[in-house]
Image (cartoon, rainbow, N blue to C red):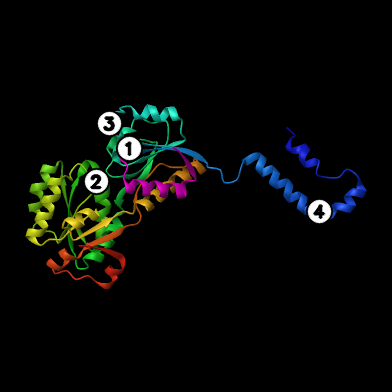
Amino acid sequence: MQSAQSFCCGLWPRHKSAWGERRRYAPALAALVMAVIILLFTGQAGAAVCEIVVVQSSEIRPFQEALEGFEETSGCSIKEVMAVQPGIPDLSSIVRRLRPDAVLALGLDAVIRLQQIRDIPVFFTMAANLPENIRAGDNVSGVSMIVEPERQIEALKLVLPNIRRAGVIFNVARSRNFIDRLIQAGRRHHVEIIATPAKSPQDVLHLLSELKGRADAIMMLPDLTLITQETVNAMLLFSFNHSIPLVSFSEKFAGMGALAAITIIPRDIGRQTGEMAREYFRDRIAYKNRRSYARKNEIFINWTVARKLGIGIRDELLKKSMKVE
């Protein structure tokens, strides 16, 4: 194969007369030489910078939207997509054999099943409240499916402008950092966060009664160690019996009787995670692993519940929320 040097030299005439006749083409020839050198040393323009294996907890639409968002911003190509299956116990070994540049884990189950991987970058999204041993991994980065605390308080104030105290039941082992930041954000917006720790779903049932008379509203966190069908029903019943608004994290619960839901946007947290991956592959040495909260949110309002609680829906909220009956 002809070397870059000999190829470039062959573009230039050897005789002075020829040079004199063709010197007006020098700028164009120089530009052509530079383009050839760039192609020789960098390969085809626009090629993906990395290959990703995707592991998802289940095959549901929000995960697909998050994956599409990741593809939009990461600059990576998807090598393979696999779902967590009960009959595949050693998923980490399968992923290693595929030799990806990194792994994208969609959902908490996927993250947990990949916790044995320490030698490949793991980017997670659509997961919340990661166990401590996973959070401590120096190869793990990603975006939680919990909306950033500041944005949560801003959304809460948009739904309930006069709120002064919000009650939150949380798992200390999983949500301590988030609660600390939520308390700080609350102070900036003059909302006191009454944080009540719990260790199990059974704790939630009796802790709700302690919030009666102390909280103007209850905030529900997406913590699978505390959220069960029983605890959700208990929160909805408590809200109904005591006329205390319940603000959840899921449109589904707003449809079941919560006043509102402050939710993530799956496609955007996919994009946010993709930006992390792109930053990592741009400069692996300088990159610092991090875990972020979702930067954007949507608001769903149950108008039927709002009317029963005597809560007016302001024009500003109408423009920024979606209606749930």
Amino acid type assigned to the residue bearing label 2 in the image: Arg
**Quadrant (top left/top right/bottom left/bottom right) for the C terminus:** bottom left
Residue under label 2, please give it: 176
Dominant secondary structure, magenta: helix
Left or right of 33: which side holds 295?
left
- Circle nearer the viewer, 2 or 4: 4
Which residue occupies 27% across, 47% down?
A: 177
Check if mark 4's residue and mark 3's residue have beta carbons within 8 Å: no
Q: Are marks 4 and 1 in contact (CB under 8 Å)?
A: no
Badge 1 marks a residue whose secondary structure is helix
Tell me the residue at 34%/51% (across/down). Answer: 266
* Residue 117 placement: quadrant: top left
Estimate the spatial distance between the alpha carbons at disc 1 and disc 2, rounded to whole Å. Answer: 20 Å
Query: Circle 4 is placed at which residue position?
Result: 25
Is there any visible trace of residue 211 in the rendered image? no
Q: Which residue is mark 3?
A: 86
Residue 111 badge:
1
Between the residue at mark 2 and the residue at mark 4, the CA separation in whole angstroms equals: 68 Å
255 up-or-down from 48: above or below: below
